[in-house]
Amino acid sequence: MEKVYFTITGTKHYYGQEYFEPKMEVKLVKEPDNEIDKEAIKVEMDGLGLVGYVANSPFTVQGESMSAGRLYDKIGDKATGIVKYILPQGVLCELIV
């Protein structure tokens, strides 16, 4: 199966991205009641809770990673990802299928 990547954005509104490290696990949770984005997917970490969101704008999606809108129908209500790279513009992760 083809690898699927996504970008975590908005980390500065929570805990920042300094604590992210490659191979860390993150949880994706759909947030259908989000008033700003009906395709919002929040990103959580054990012990911290909400740490950001899957990028859903051409300005925040990094490289060939999928936006939340493209990823939304490919996952169930929850999914898991693994941190691959920490970039100045966001955290690049791989979806675990």
Image: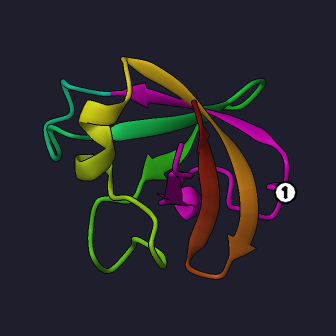
> Hey, what amino acid is under mark 1?
Pro
Q: Residue at 28% of width from left, 37% of height from top?
A: 72
Measuring from the top left, give residue 24's x and y in whole percent: 82, 43
Q: Residue at 57% of width from left, 58% of height from top?
A: 11
Toward the top, the furthest residue is: 77
Which quarter shows the N terminus? Answer: top right
Q: Residue at 68% of width from left, 60% of height from top?
A: 16
Q: In the displayed structure, does residue 47 sit left or right of residue 51?
A: right
Task: In this rendered view, identify the residue nearer to me: 37 or 25.
Answer: 25
Magenta stretch: give its range: 1-30
Residue designated by label 1: 22
Q: Quadrant of residue 33?
A: top left
Question: Is disc 1 surrounded by few (<14), some (14 to 19) or many (20+) residues within 10 Å?
Answer: few
The tally of labels here is 1
Q: In the displayed structure, does residue 15 sit left or right of residue 57?
A: right
Q: Is residue 29 magenta?
A: yes
Q: Residue at 38% of width from left, 28% of height from top?
A: 75
Q: In the displayed structure, does residue 28 sit left or right of residue 24?
A: left
Task: In this rendered view, identify the residue nearer to me: 29 or 96.
Answer: 96
Measuring from the top left, give residue 69's x and y in whole percent: 23, 49
Measuring from the top left, give residue 23's x and y in whole percent: 85, 48
Above-or-below relation of 9 to 50? below
Measuring from the top left, give residue 57's x and y in whole percent: 27, 68
Q: Is residue 74 magenta?
A: no
Above-or-below relation of 54 to 30? below
Q: In the displayed structure, does residue 89 sit left or right of residue 19?
A: left
Which quarter shows the C terminus? Answer: top right
Q: Secondary structure at mark 1?
A: loop
